[in-house]
Image (cartoon, grey):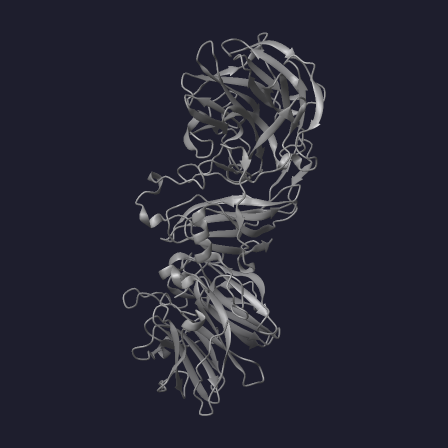
Amino acid sequence: MKLFTTIFFVLMSMYNVWGQEKVSSTNNTVIYNGVPWFDDKADIVNAHGACIVEDDGKYYLFGEYKTDSVNMFIGFSCYSSTDLVNWTFERLALPQQKDGPLGPDRVGERVKVMKSPATGEYVMYMHTDDRKYTDPQVGYATSKTINGEYTFQGPLLYEGEPIRKWDMGTFQDHDGTGYLLMHHGDIYRLSADFRSAADRVVSGIPGSGESPAMFHEGGTYYLLSSGLTSWERNDNMYHTAPSIEGPWTKQGVFAPEGTLTHNSQCSFVFPVKSGKQMEYMYMGDRWSYPRQGQAATQVWLPLKAKGTTLSIPTYWAAWDVTTFRPVNRQLLGLPVNQQLKSNRKGDFVTIPFNGAALGLVGRSGPDGGYARISIVGKGGDTLQSSLVDFYSKVTHSGLRFVSPAFPEGDYTLHVEVAGEQGVWRNKRGDRFGSTDFWVRIEDVKLLSDSANVAAREYLLPSDNKNNPVIHGYYADPEILYAEKTGKYYLYPTSDGFHNWAGYRFKVFSSSNLRDWQDEGVMLDLRRDTRWASNNAWAPCIIEKKTATGYKYYYYYSAAKNIGVAVADEPTGPFTDLGKPIIPNDTTTRSQEIDPDVMYDPASGKYFLYWGSGYMRVAELNENMTSIKKETINVLTPKSTYREGTYVVHRNNKYYFFWSENDTRDENYRVRYAISDSPTGPLNIPESNLILAKDTTKGIYGPGHHSVIQVPGTDEWYIVYHRFRRPNAKGMGWAAGYNREVCIDRMEFNTDGTIKVVVPTL
């Protein structure tokens, strides 16, 4: 059997209905910045250009509900929380309207909500526009309840006319008076019922920008705003004044210059009670155009205000909202075999863990692209999948993804290079965004005490010196020496998927059998085949020299059938036949898997072997993509045969290998037989067990192998998988989904029998 590597995250099999289960927070008082947040249903919190309103002992977060394809108004979302960390989706408090300023194909931004002390009514404000931003105005909506649904009332009027400006914010002073803040420094005092603008108290504060936010502390008013750089981040600025009418003085930036406000744009300032004093929380957005719905994130940080000085002195990736202090979590020291640094679409890494919350640490930069991060449960179902943005104009290393905490069990995080990048243009046509597709995962942070258990059992690096030879979770290795290139190539099953649910194959190259280079994904079932989408297992390959050059025929298990793909190079690209070469016959066998292909130098023929619970052989036709059905023969060795046939020729003898027991069993191991023919019969030596576990070294489950002869010599090596060391055995059955590939010397006795292989570290 074969495995694949993904990131298992949610224990789906424990629940009948996923939507009915609550997701546990990583910590009920810790805010994690710059990462996707998940609500109580494991959906991404989608609320941007946001504000928070505290009402009747709960917090309500309002924001733009963004799409992933186009900048268009869908609705304004409302979430509720009791702790500012764990959020419950209430509803679209104001959905798209049938027509008008917030109708189809319109823009709605910068939603803000305040409660009128005079009427007790909740009033929502927003910037409405067409998609070309040529019809700006401030609109408003009202509701008797804070979570809506709100009724859109039309434009907010000042002196009988709509306020035709774009980026806007709101501010409610200590006495309850409401104000409307506009880009470039216009400030309006609202009427008592908040349904109109009564006075323009300030006009055009010099040096102010867009996306305004305000708060009042210690006799000083602070006005925050952003430069005009489209969706790009910039060094936001602030002004101060002794009264809201001014005079306003530009003070400069409030985050360290060059950090681009810690890669964010200001949206709101929310006062938070911390003990006996009031603290102020900066709320900013990390936009991610065009994938705003999935990949845009939030940055919430404490503000330090005193007199005319305002600052966010340092960036806190995580901080406790009850103490307003940073939370420092332990870096694991992720092994190199679990890191990902690639710009090739489809490259991936998988990190299994036990459900405790983990944080992925990576580097964003000007060349960063999107990663697809998936959460797969023990049952093999993908329970959550979304894009994470690795772009930032200023390079930054930190948290890129934080998992929710789920019940203890076997999970995997799967991180894949999506091959997409954030790119957009402003009204003038200037290009913004990423220059490449890089995704860089560098480490893991343990976000809870139980995560230490996950690290010990799943992630700690092994003490191996020589094995495994390729980094990561792989199994069922096939090895080839290519005459065309003079190199060796490894073709493993990509491992780590529960129940072997993977769907892609990789290839690695080496000139010396020791140092292996990842050549990337060479066959993706969901991209390259029409007849299968999962269970990509146990490949084999052969090089055939033709009159026009070399051809490479790659046979593989997929959806419990055997397929074949063809290429001109050992690394591909491979073109699938379009149908199985050995289709699954459900009337006679449960699955047709584990192919092996051999060239017989004695007859000049090519043979295909396969089977699970049985060993079949058939001669291949000249085209190598079909078999001679009349040559099918069954060669199953008695009692010990399970799967993984492999056949080699040496000194006029044919050596048939196979694996015994279940691949999830620590006693998975390799036996062999000898024959005078590539089609049998088999002669089984009295002592035919050549590879088995070594408990003194913590080696378990070695098997499903291939064999390679160093060209021009009688030097042989066996390439096999085993449970990942040092702790996979403690994972139970999951050890059979988390394996690593090793290479050891295989030697023959003078009588032609094979010596017992000593597995090494």
**Which residue extends farthest bottom?**
751
Q: Quadrant of the N terminus?
A: bottom left
Judge by depth and name the residue closer to the eye, 471 or 270: 270
Judge by depth and name the residue closer to the eye, 347 or 351: 351
**Which residue extends farthest left?**
587
Q: Position of residue 277 (x, y in %)?
A: 53, 24
Judge by depth and name the residue closer to the eye, 406 or 157: 406
Judge by depth and name the residue closer to the eye, 667 or 414: 667
Q: Position of residue 359 (x, y in %)?
A: 51, 47
Q: Position of residue 282 (x, y in %)?
A: 57, 29
Looking at the image, is 695 positioned above or below residue 680? above
Looking at the image, is 264 positioned above or below residue 93? below
Can residue 45 be seen in this snapshot? yes
Count of picture labels = 0
Looking at the image, is 316 positioned above or below residue 304? below
Can residue 558 be seen in this snapshot? no
**Which residue extends farthest front?**
276
Looking at the image, is 205 positioned above or below residue 715? above
Q: Position of residue 407 (x, y in %)?
A: 37, 47
> Left or right: where does residue 360 sit relative to residue 225?
left
